[in-house]
Image (cartoon, rainbow, N blue to C red):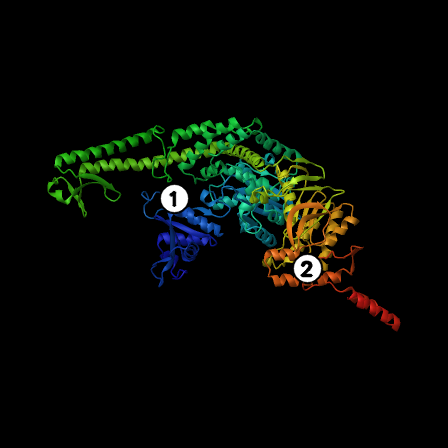
Amino acid sequence: MSTHLTVPIEKLSPMLRLYVQLKEERPDTILLIRVGDFFEAYGEDAETIARELEITLTGRDIQGMTTRYPMAGVPHHALDRYLARLVQKGFKVAICDQIENPKEAKGLVKRAVTRVVTPGTLVEDALLDAKSNNYLVAVVLKSPAFGLGVVDVSTGEFLVTELDEGDWGRLIDEVMRLMPAECLVPEGLDELAEAIAGVCPATLTRLGGEALPRRPREALLEHFGVSTLRGFGCDDFTAGLDAAAALLAYLRATHMNAVQHITSLATYSTGEAMVLDAPARRNLELTAGLYDSAKAKSLLAVLDETRTPMGGRMLKKWLDSPLLSVERIEDRLDSVQLLHRDTLTRGDLRDALRPMADLERLIARLSTGAANARDLVALKLSLEAVPAVASLAPEKLAEGIDPLPEVVELLARAIADEPPLTVREGNLIKDGYDEELDELRKITRGGKTWIAQLEADEREKTGIKSLKIGFNSVFGYFIEVTKANIGSVPESYIRKQTTAQGERFITPELKEMEARVLGAEEKIHAREFDLFCVVRDDVAKKQGAAVLTLAQALARLDVFAALAEVAQLSRFVRPVVDGGDVIEIKGGRHPVVEKLMGGANFISNDTYLDGAQSQVHIITGPNSAGKSTVLRQVALIVLLAQVGSFVPADYARIGIVDRIFTRVGAHDDLAAGQSTFMVEMTEAAEILNNATERSLVILDEIGRGTSTFDGLSIAWAVAEFLSARGCKTLFATHYHLLNDLEKQLPNVKNFRIAVKETGDRILWLRKVLPGGTDKSYGIQVARMAGLPPTVIQRAQEILGDLEKDGSKRRDTLGGARVSARTEKVQLTLFEAEENPVLEELRNIDLDTLTPVEALIQLQRFKKQLG
């Protein structure tokens, strides 16, 4: 089959001609057109959906073409399921639907593109993650600022901010935090687009100049129906208004009804929250596991005891944006404590929240016309549960919890209790709601009663006991008689159809009643649909904002109850949060590791960091001893405290931290052409260039990716730099020589992970103790990992030789002479330390050396070499 049309467009059928014209307008979009009970695609689009959806590719004969034109389609009732798969693969899909009733159409049924489905414009539940926002982001540059617009069409959330043009890193970090499904970037910002593509998997949509509103301020004023943007806090924005207006324009172009429920614009500042860059989010495993991306191994999984989708999304947003304001943090902690103290009320409250539907996304579907009657029933049932929630909520947390009784009354009076999924086949509206509908129903009920009576009368009149009246969509109502009784059929019956079992007949009276009944049923379906649309639109337009306010109030209550529940179940305590420079943790635990271990076996640890005497901790200890866990748990406790959550510790005092930086583990980025060591150094550079005295830095094994002395030198210099910068730092390392920093710098302290030795085997005690260590236990770890005994034995021999040589050498680091003794720096089989005899040989002055001195020197070298 050929995907190229080889005949003039005017020779195509009207429907195919329309398809080709619409496709030319959207060359980068898959086009699906409604044909009967299917949505079909043709040409290259047909081949694409057949391949991606694994459905059959067929063809259509076109006069004048020697080969069939590719065609593929999906059933209309299963469209959402197939759309989900296409959108997940990054495709945009235009839906060309029928816009008139086929029964009323003269000639070709009118069709038009009613929706362009893109990853960032979804409102359908089947296509969304209930507990994650589905953000569409626009980034615009208008010197000297970047404008960042953010919208979640599925909830109506609409945000805008501006960042300095030079603050490129902060912009990328913010996009990473939002993790949008789709990102709009104007053409010409290629470097920015590449940077965004490098940090998140969003579908990238490039906007030409014609797609950007020429008068963004006026576009926003018109949309919100206001005369000034001062009330939204963005009246003095420039690039931000461009970004916000670009989002609205894009929504109108793709999802014509998607802007109706966007009734407010919130301005925010990235300076209001702790900055967490991509390495920090990854290494701290906030929403996904580090190695397998499993949500179950994330901090979010530990905390998410929410009962509602709205609460789940809010919790995730809080986790992504820890606060910097002590006042706001304390307010959240007060709310958690209220529910933490009252276990019985909290349990009842969480039970009362359980029936709540996703109110935000319900309103989005109502506003965009995507809702069915079951959505209205779900809204009614949710609102009916609100009074119970309001009665249980503490007064401090009850603000905004309005049960909206007028909405409940309308829906209870209008919408059937158990409506069908479809909205054009009746049974949507209750009796008594509409007089015209009630009259039509009387006709159909009376007609059906008349038909049932006719069946009884005809049996008696003809004596045919098996006579029955049936119905199908082709012939309407008919009288059916078996072959054995054909001789008893009256002459007034009109034969209509012969079947295997007998004959089917009609009578003038039966057809007359059929016309009345079917005509009334068709009118009923149309009337019910019209009434449903009025109710749906009335709720969306008049009560949509109130429902969204209620949804936010319930979400907050849900999050506080969830955090209180976790605190009780996992023995979390309320932290002391202040503006000081001390981080003091007693009995700190890693919340994720502890939960995965079952809690009982986790070893807790204390930490004390300040800006004077205990600012940098050098933590030594063997692999697998738990250094990384200790580092991460301190960072997570700080982060949880600034989220407004209780923390896994016996006691915690947290001075506000502006950023958490992490450099943990080894990985490469081959797609970007970066080796493991280059990634390590790039992340280290980001830390050193941006950390402040209010930052918390956790480093694990800096310098491991290069030669021993290069790595040790880098690690030493980094530790010195952070000490001078004033950052509170936890520095885990195998380089035991770094312990000497404690003697030279007053704000550096040494700690070690305790290990118990039994012969040549070791037991991890997981306890952090003061003081350094001089062993790495690498060979013991290798034995535990299962290396062959011959390899272990040979490694021990080599290590003995290297330590023997190294014990006689002295090196200078950072201007101080440091004895290596038996404190071996990290060594490899291929990079043994150079023997110090060689250095002495290089420094001998042969021109002045006498024979006797030469013999003495040679004798000394011989003793040194053993």
Secondary structure beneath label 1: loop
Residue 334 at x, y percent in the picture: 61, 31
Task: Please identify, in this view, whether the residue under mark 1 or under mark 2 is nearer the observer.
Answer: 2
Q: Which mark is residue 99?
A: 1
The residue at 44%/32% (across/down) is 381
As displayed, is residue 1 above or below residue 303? below
Which residue ends up furthest to the left in the rendered image? 487
In the displayed orientation, state which residue is furthest to the bottom: 851
In what quadrant of the picture does the C terminus appear? bottom right
- Residue 356 lies left or right of residue 745; in this view the side is left
SS category of the residue bearing label 2: loop
Which of 459/169 is in front? 459
What residue would you read off at disc 2? 706
User: Could you tell me if residue 678 is visible in this image?
Assistant: no
Q: Is residue 577 above or below residue 87?
A: above
Q: Amino acid at mark 1?
A: Ile
Mark linked to residue 787: none
Q: Position of residue 58 (x, y in %)?
A: 36, 57
Q: Quadrant of residue 407 in the image?
A: top left
- In this picture, is 95 found above or below 524? below
Residue type pointed to by label 2: Thr
Residue placed furthest toward the front: 759
What x and y, as percent, mark residue 145? 64, 46
Rendering coords of residue 304 (x, y %): 54, 40
Position of 509 with respect to 224 (left or right) is: left
